[in-house]
Image (cartoon, helix red, strand yellow):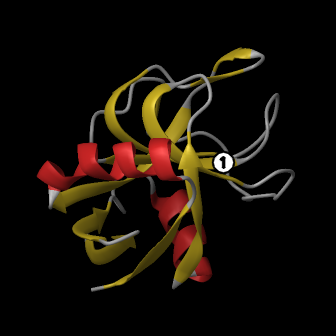
């Protein structure tokens, strides 16, 4: 497992890449690191923040996929019936879009700073998009 540092708004988290469970997704994401973008609050899925990626081709299929990421789990939806996206659960999530329930590849788990996740979610919900950076620790 590769250690990561995730900075989202004013919050810093420790995390790991799940290379054994999602090897293709992790390999592709490593190519994009350090990863910088903005997170916004999810529309349909519940308590999560997401990075909408439109028609970006992540280049992987399903692996280690779930529709119910737990708080601190990060998934990537590689595209298909909805747009490509990265989602970070901070509470209860049923991953979905306007076309219905989806499944995304669980490839990162936050291991440090989990207690800050609800505050991140509230910040994004009430104050808008926040910068996110995912890099090697």
Taking the image as shown, residue 69 lies to the left or right of residue 81, namely left
Q: Position of residue 78 (x, y in %)?
A: 69, 46
Q: Position of residue 32 (x, y in %)?
A: 61, 79
Numbered marks: total: 1
Name the residue nearer the viewer: 108 or 21.
Answer: 108
Taking the image as shown, residue 112 lies to the left or right of residue 137, namely left
Q: Quadrant of residue 16?
A: bottom left
Q: Which residue is mark 1?
A: 85
> Callout 1 environment at 10 Å: few (<14), some (14 to 19), or many (20+)?
some
Taking the image as shown, residue 60 lies to the left or right of residue 8, namely right
Name the residue nearer the viewer: 66 or 92.
Answer: 92
- Work out which residue is located at the far front of the displayed protein and give it: 127
For the N terminus, the image quarter is bottom left
Q: Quadrant of residue 43?
A: top right
Residue under the image location 76 percent in, 42 percent down = 79
Name the residue nearer the viewer: 19 or 118.
Answer: 118
Q: Is residue 96 above or below residue 110?
A: above
For the C terminus, the image quarter is bottom left
- Work out which residue is located at the far right of the displayed protein and give it: 55
For the question of whether residue 21 can be seen, the reply is no
Q: Position of residue 126 (x, y in %)?
A: 47, 44
Residue under the image location 24 percent in, 57 percent down = 110
Q: Is residue 112 above or below residue 36?
A: above
Residue under the image location 48 percent in, 41 percent down = 125
Q: Position of residue 13 (x, y in %)?
A: 24, 68
């Amino acid at each position: 497992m590769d250690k990561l540092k995730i900075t989202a708004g004013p919050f810093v988290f420790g995390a790991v890449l799940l290379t054994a469970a999602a090897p293709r997704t992790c390999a592709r994401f490593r190519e994009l690191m350090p990863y910088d973008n903005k997170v916004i609050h999810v529309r349909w899925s519940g308590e999560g923040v997401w990075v909408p990626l439109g028609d970006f081709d992540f280049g992987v299929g399903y692996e280690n996929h779930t529709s119910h990421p737990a708080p601190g789990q990060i998934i990537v939806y590689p595209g298909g019936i909805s747009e490509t996206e990265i989602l970070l659960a901070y509470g209860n999530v049923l991953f979905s879009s306007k076309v219905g329930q989806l499944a995304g590849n669980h490839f990162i788990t936050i291991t440090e700073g989990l207690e800050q996740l609800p505050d991140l979610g509230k910040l994004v919900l009430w104050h808008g998009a926040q910068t996110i950076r995912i890099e090697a620790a």
